[in-house]
Amino acid sequence: MKRKLILVVLVLIIAMFLAGCSGGGIVTPATDEAKIKSVINEYCLAINDQNWSKVKSYCVYGSDRYYAVCQMEDLFNTAYLYCNIITINAYADILNVSIDGNYSQAYCYVSIIMTGCGEYESDTKYTYYYLQKVGNSWKLY
């Protein structure tokens, strides 16, 4: 009898555990730090895809970062006149994020490599990305 009771309790505990892992539990909203890291990573992915309108959508319109993206797009378009195949590999290793109200800065190691026609240009450095909260999302400025 004792053995059956232990077995029933064990089965109930396992059932409760599995029900909690099924995705029907409480969903916690993303923290601001997670949102900031996501924006920076998505920004780099959009650069890799050479989707300039998407890259700009991660920036505050008219900001320094927005105009830097415009310059990068112009450089790409000029290079494309000479080479039909151009690849861009952008990567940001986010080392630290600090948030102060609606503003944030992320300290990153950034690497960007653009290749075409057998030539390449690269830029790697430690830098800060500055972000501003616009509505419920973060944008680079």
Image (cartoon, rainbow, N blue to C red):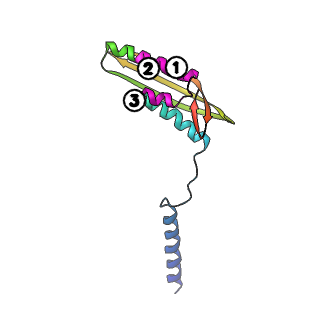
Taking the view exactly as shown, the residue that stands out farthest to the right is 100
Residue 83, placed above or below residue 58: above
Q: Residue at x 60, y 39 (%)?
A: 135
Q: Position of residue 136 (x, y in %)?
A: 60, 41
Q: Which residue is mark 3?
A: 49
The C terminus, quarter of image: top right
Q: Left or right: where does residue 131 sit relative to residue 24? A: right
Magenta stretch, main secondary structure class: helix
- Residue type marked 2: Glu
- Residue type marked 1: Ala
Q: Nearer the viewer, residue 78 or 95?
A: 78
Q: Position of residue 122 (x, y in %)?
A: 45, 18
Q: Quadrant of residue 76?
A: top left
CA gap, disc 3 and disc 2: 12 Å
Q: Which residue is mark 1?
A: 68
Query: Which secondary structure, mark 1?
Result: helix
Question: Is residue 37 rendered magenta in the image?
Answer: no
Q: Label for residue 73?
A: 2
Instruction: Look at the image and give the residue range highlighted in magenta.
Output: 48-76
Q: Residue at x 54, y 28 (%)?
A: 59
Q: Position of residue 56 (x, y in %)?
A: 49, 27
Q: Residue at x 49, y 70 (%)?
A: 15
